Amino acid sequence: MKKTGFIWDESYFWHQTGQGALNSGSGGWIQADTHAENPETKRRVKNLLDRSRFIKELHQIEPRAATRKEVEMNHDQTYLNCLKELSDAGGGDAGEHAIVGPDSYEIALLSAGGALTAVDAVMKNEVQNAYTLTRPPGHHAEYETGMGFCLMNNVAIAAKYAREAYGLKRILILDWDVHHGNGTESAFRSDKDVLFISIHQENIFPKNRGGISYTGEAGGEGYTVNIELPAGTGNEGYLQTFDKVIEPIVNQYQPELILISAGQDPSRFDPLGRMLMTAGGFYDMAARMKVLAENHCNGRLVALHEGGYSTAYVPFCTLRVLEALSGKQSGVEDPFDQGYHEGPFYQNQAEAIHKVIEIQKQYWEL
Ligand code: ZN
């Protein structure tokens, strides 16, 4: 049995977002804190893998940098030039909350390159599947602007690369980050070669994106699946969504490769989300995606780290994802589960899932 690939680089933790209060400046009214998207949530994932020795169950792979040509598959030249200039000048904002620090351009190329490294390793069957601890994250980045801490859209670049390098015709991107994957949706909105499914908290960020009635356009109509769930949804609501919406659609689409935008910010403790997932819930989602990959594409699955801002809980949630993907157990207990694995599940969550089914019935048998 081949191992799960794990791709990371020390420089992923060197992308500097500076000080802030949550996700921006405090307007000068409260003392500056560490920015929500800081290296610690990711570095502590690596720390937990080392501390628990689970890293030994994984096949570590060094990322290569993406080439300029590769990132141009998904980004405008002018934008990339601007990103480089800001980075060379020591920093700035490349869009809406898209913080650039010194050397962020080069680190972003290595982050996107980590995604490509993972795609190659999985497509060449060197590993059974792979997880990349990408940073900066990518799913909010649009063609011509950065957004929401994202500079280059790692998952979109990976999908375009996989299509070009391996001639794939059906790629699934599942985005379970608590925020809508607007940049990824934009990249494939009129494209049926990539099925984009985003499960997110309703209307949290970006504003007015990710509504369930938006299903793609032109030749891609029906290949964008937006699933909005109400604040307070926990494991049960997410898993019912897998049962009733995600799995039936993926079984009909029959992907040749599965990419996951794995944001661990639907967790119970995230400061930038209001969902109630436990680490065990992340295990369940990843395990179900692994089964889908085994049933449809010889297990080919790449998960890319996106958001997740609880320094205490993101490491545990990510460890569970890695356990599920590798089929190995770490023996690490979740100190924060506190009996919340089952729920809570309320009527408004059932209604939200039902509404999605009513819309998606136009395109899929549900
Ligand atoms: Zn997020």
Image (spheres, helix red, strand yellow):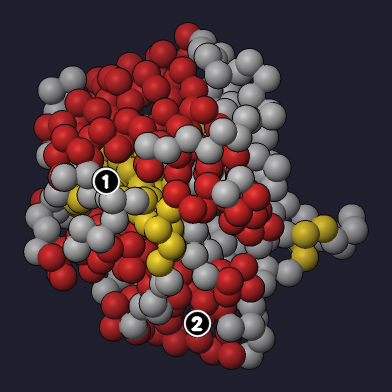
Rendered view: 366 above or below 192:
above
Residue 252 visible to an observer of this rendering? yes
Relative vertical location of residue 314 with respect to residue 240 in this rendering, above or below: below
Which is nearer the eye, 134 or 131? 131
Cα–Cα span, label 2 and label 1: 35 Å
**Is 193 drawn above or below residue 179 in the view shown?**
below
Q: Quadrant of residue 12?
A: bottom right
Residue 149 % position (x, y): 56, 62
Work out whether residue 319 or residue 38 is closer to the camera in this orientation and state it.
319
Is the CB–ligand 1 distance for label 2 below 8 Å? no
Task: Please state which amino acid type lies under the numbered disc 2.
Answer: Glu
Q: Nearer the viewer, mark 2 or mark 1?
A: 1
Total marks in image: 2
Quadrant assignment for the C terminus: top left
The image shows residue 154 at horizontal and vertical percentages of: 39, 64
The 10 Å Cα crowd at callout 2, few under 14, some 14 to 19, many 20 or more, is some
Check if mark 2's residue and mark 1's residue have beta carbons within 8 Å. no
Find residue 106 and name its label.
2
> Which amino acid lies under the numbered mark 1 shown in the image of this protein?
Met
Residue 202 visible to an observer of this rendering: no
Q: Which mark is residue 1?
A: 1
Say whether disc 2 or disc 1 marks the residue closer to the N-terminus.
1
Residue at the spot 30% in from the left edge and 20% down from the top edge: 243
100 displayed left or right of 158: right
Residue 345 position within the rendered picture, expressed as x and y whole percent measured from the top left: 51, 12
Describe the element under mark 1 as helix, strand or loop.
loop
Q: Is residue 290 above or below residue 277?
A: below
Q: Tag 2, which secondary structure? A: helix
Identify the residue shown where x is 61% and y is 45%: 52
Left or right side of 218 for 134: right
